[in-house]
Image: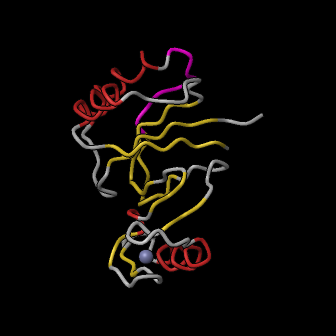
Amino acid sequence: MSDNYLHLVPSDPRWQPDAAAAEKAVEIARPLFPQAEHVSVEYKEGVTFFDAGANTESIHCAFCGSDLEDWWGGAMDEAAASDFTDLAVVTPCCGKSTSLNDLRYVWPAAFGTCALTVVNPAATSLDADQLQGIEQAIGSPLRVVWQHL
Ligand SMILES: [Zn+2]
């Protein structure tokens, strides 16, 4: 049996909400996913890569659109060696300075030290206004990662 997760990851990989903001965000998110098994904010010990799992199709340069899949594995290994404390990279295709967090992941993925996670949300989409309500409660813009394992 496979599992689906919705991870809402703060746009700044190091940012974390305080306990009150996290609780409020969960209160807002829970009724949006009445069939979900679990809704909570999970804190990680270090920067973690929340990927789309089996949904992952491709990774492209956000500047020129080049396919970066072959290069990306090595870049991830290098960043992992420093526990993802440094996500800065220079794109191999067009030589631009950017972050591993700002490549074009299809489906979307994000780095973070925490995420509001919905386990088996049943839903497969989140409306912009619903997302905005959660962002306001938690106090940060959020990246939406639909992970299929
Ligand atoms: Zn490029």
Please state the total of marks drawn on the protein image: 0
User: Image quadrant of residue 73?
Assistant: bottom right
Residue 98, compared with residue 58, is above or below; it is below
Which residue is located at x 50 percent, y 80 percent? 78
Indicate which quadrant contains ligand 1. bottom left
Residue 65, compared with residue 128, is above or below; it is below
Which residue is located at x 53 percent, y 26 percent? 38
Q: Please provide percent x and percent y for residue 100.
A: 42, 68
Which residue is located at x 29 percent, y 47 percent? 16
Q: Nearer the viewer, residue 64 or 135?
A: 64
User: Image quadrant of residue 59?
Assistant: bottom right
Q: How is the model colour-coded? A: secondary structure
Q: Is residue 35 magenta?
A: yes
Q: Nearer the viewer, residue 71 or 136?
A: 71
Q: Is residue 147 left or right of residue 22?
A: right
> In this view, which residue lies farthest toward the front?
64
Q: Is residue 141 left or right of residue 80?
A: left
Q: Please provide percent x and percent y for residue 105.
A: 50, 58
Q: Please provide percent x and percent y for residue 90.
A: 39, 81
Which residue is located at x 40 percent, y 66 percent? 62
Q: Is residue 82 magenta?
A: no
Q: Nearer the viewer, residue 67 or 81?
A: 67
Q: Is residue 35 left or right of residue 25?
A: right
Quadrant including the C terminus: top right
Q: Which residues are magenta?
A: 34-41
Residue 103, compared with residue 137, is above or below; it is below
Quadrant including the N terminus: top right
